[in-house]
Image: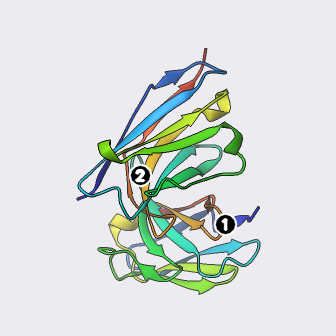
Amino acid sequence: QVQLQESGPGLVKPSETLSLTCTVSGDSISGYYWSWIRQTPGKGLEWIGHVHYTGRTKYNPSLRSRITISLDTSKSQFSLRVSSLTAADTALYYCARGLNADEFDFWGQGTLVSVSS
Amino acid sequence: DIQMTQSPSTLSASVGDRVTITCRASQSIGTWLAWYQQKPGKAPKLLIYKALTSQSGVPSRFSGSGSGTEFTLTISSLQPDDFATYYCQQYSTYSIFGQGTRLEIK
């Protein structure tokens, strides 16, 4: 059974950079897309971006200038960096596996990130 | 940007009812549409992709239909486990989710 687990800080300061990692177990990174998605009560579910197992990335245009998603196949991990944080980036962050492209069949449990001084 | 509009926002129904949730796209997305179920404190669960293909392990009472700009998720006979929030997602361009439909017990 595929499992994904997010890790990273729960609290970060405004203007700083958030770094999250998703560790994949139970299957290979190869052949799939790997996404980050966040959820807030106000905006609902928001796709952040994905990295293909080949390393190709695609980002949400509204976040593109602040986002980097990368892949470490040797560790079965992929990572998210979000720069220039504001309170609006406070959210529950999920990592997920995408079939074909963005059909998210496996998700992590989510990690809550608060942006506050 | 493509806008996704789900209706209704809230739906009250009883066990055994047939229910339909609608998702409309502001422009044609072909069949690049998925449906998810989310329960409180849990990640969303993929039910349907490519508008009408059921994900492995999903009960047959869930079905999807539609193409272009109008899509539906139908639950043929509601079970107690089905009361949850449902989201559509288009992935024709980049992924955009609908605002959700909360299915509650009448």
Q: Position of residue A5 (x, y in %)?
A: 33, 42
Q: Position of residue B56 (x, y in %)?
A: 32, 75
Way the structure is coloured: rainbow
Residue type of the residue flagged with mark 1: Thr
The disc at residue B43 is 2
The disc at residue B93 is 1
Residue type of the residue flagged with mark 2: Ala
In this rendering, position of residue B28 left or right of residue A68: right
The answer to whether any part of residue A63 appears in the image is: no
Mark 2 Cα shell of 10 Å, populated few (<14), some (14-19), many (≥20): some
The part of the image, by quadrant, that contains residue B91 is: bottom right
For the residues beneath circles 1 and 2, the answer to whether they share a chain is yes
Subunit bearing disc 1? B
Subunit bearing disc 2? B
Q: Position of residue B9 (x, y in %)?
A: 63, 62
**Residue at 60% from the left image edge and 19% from the top image edge:** A116
Asked whether B53 or B21 is in front, the reply is B53
In this rendering, position of residue A86 left or right of residue A23: right
The disc at residue A45 is none
In the image, residue A62 above or below residue B57: above
Task: Check disc 1 and report its element: helix, strand or loop.
Answer: loop
